[in-house]
Amino acid sequence: MAASPTFCIITPNPALDHILLAPSLRIGTIQRVPQTHLAAGGKGLNVARVARALGMNVTVCAPLGGFTGQHVASLAVREGIALTAVPIDGETRICTLIVDPTTDTITVLNEQGPSLTDHHWQAFIDRVLKVQATWNLICGSLPPGIAPTVLTDLIDELYRQNRYVLVDTSGPALAAAMAVKPDVVKINGDEAGELLGMSVTSIATAQQAASELVRRGIDTAVITLGAQGAVGIGRRHGPAGVIAMPSPITARSPIGCGDSFFAGLAMALADDRSLAEALRIATACGVADAQTIEPGRIDPQIINTLAQQIAISYW
Ligand SMILES: Nc1ncnc2c1ncn2[C@@H]1O[C@H](COP(=O)(O)OP(=O)(O)OP(=O)(O)O)[C@@H](O)[C@H]1O
Ligand SMILES: O=P(O)(O)OC[C@@]1(O)O[C@H](CO)[C@@H](O)[C@@H]1O
């Protein structure tokens, strides 16, 4: 019998990521695109790609429908990602990620995704609850047609099964998840700012925001700030917060950095590392991702070396 996966990666709104490299992109013109990639995407698939590369035993649960759903499933299988697909009506979304290396800008066009009926959502949740994983990562947006409070119920149910819950989502879904205090919340500055009604663009404001998340009952709160790095604080990790700062690099694309970071963080926490070590490894994964075009396509061999280049301080 196969061993239970360590991570159940819950991906309510997967996507076929269409990544276009478009130098000197000008809106409103016709342009030739020199390079494209198609990848199994939506945040959870990116997290799974990295967690797998880091040696974790991973199962992704995702509702999938139509030709794009089939395409996502076949790309995932080709990569060796264990996927539990729940068939749905409608067509899995395409997210278009346009990288312009000339101006160093990224344009991300995330489709909403197909609406899920209550019946399909329930089928999805039933599959998630059958996966006997200790660490459960809720990744990305919710599909339309589903009330954000479904996340509250899902997390409650995972807690009843004594499973750890780590969340990386945004907007109303994040607010709904907060109601049941996930063990770990990993979000970026914009997401934290929207949740808390403040501007989170600096290390100092991220420290305030992370402390506020802990005050609201989150065990471990981590906020990422792109090239500035990340901050984290957690009840079980002692009173000190941690700042992880990467060295300057030549970034190629920030898309997926948060997902790679999340995978590294989850791996390190599952491995019972200190918060400082976990942020060091997570940041190294984010840095590795920033140097690739495709989300989550990192080389695990360089993570230890990159991790040694991350400056860690305490607050
Ligand atoms: N330009 C960069 N240089 C160095 N490290 C970076 C850069 N961009 C991202 N990172 C690393 O990746 C981590 C996550 O990045 P970021 O805060 O942009 O995540 P995100 O906004 O959630 O990304 P996404 O939603 O695209 O996955 C950062 O904390 C940092 O460690
Ligand atoms: O709509 P969501 O779930 O918030 O974001 C989806 C998405 O843009 O996020 C990833 C980058 O983090 C992309 O690979 C993916 O398609």
Image (spheres, rainbow, N blue to C red):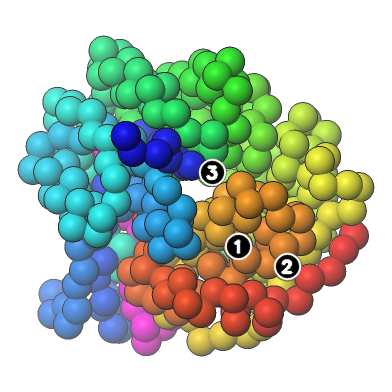
Q: Which residue is mark 2?
A: 244
> Which mark lies nearer to you, 2 or 1?
1
Amino acid type, mark 1: Ala
Q: Earlier in the sequence, mark 1 or mark 3?
A: 3
Give the residue at x 22% y 43%: 93
What element does badge 1 sit on?
Answer: helix
What element does badge 2 sit on?
Answer: strand
Mark number, residue 53: none
Q: Earlier in the sequence, mark 2 or mark 1?
A: 2
Q: Confirm if mark 3 falls within 8 A of ligand 1.
A: yes
State the image quarter where residue 295 is shown.
bottom left
Q: Confirm if mark 2 falls within 8 A of ligand 1.
A: yes
Q: Confirm if mark 1 falls within 8 A of ligand 1.
A: yes
Mark number, residue 168: 3
Amino acid type, mark 3: Asp
Give the residue at x 87% y 63%: 314
Judge whether residue 203 can be spotted in this image.
Answer: no
Q: Which residue is mark 1?
A: 282
Residue at the limit of the structure toward the front, as seen here? 1
How many marks are shown on the rendered structure? 3
Amino acid type, mark 2: Ala
Q: Locate residue 236 relative to residue 46 in the image: left or right.
A: right
Q: Residues within 10 Å of mark 2 (few under 14, many from 20)?
A: many
Judge whether residue 48 can be spotted in this image.
Answer: yes
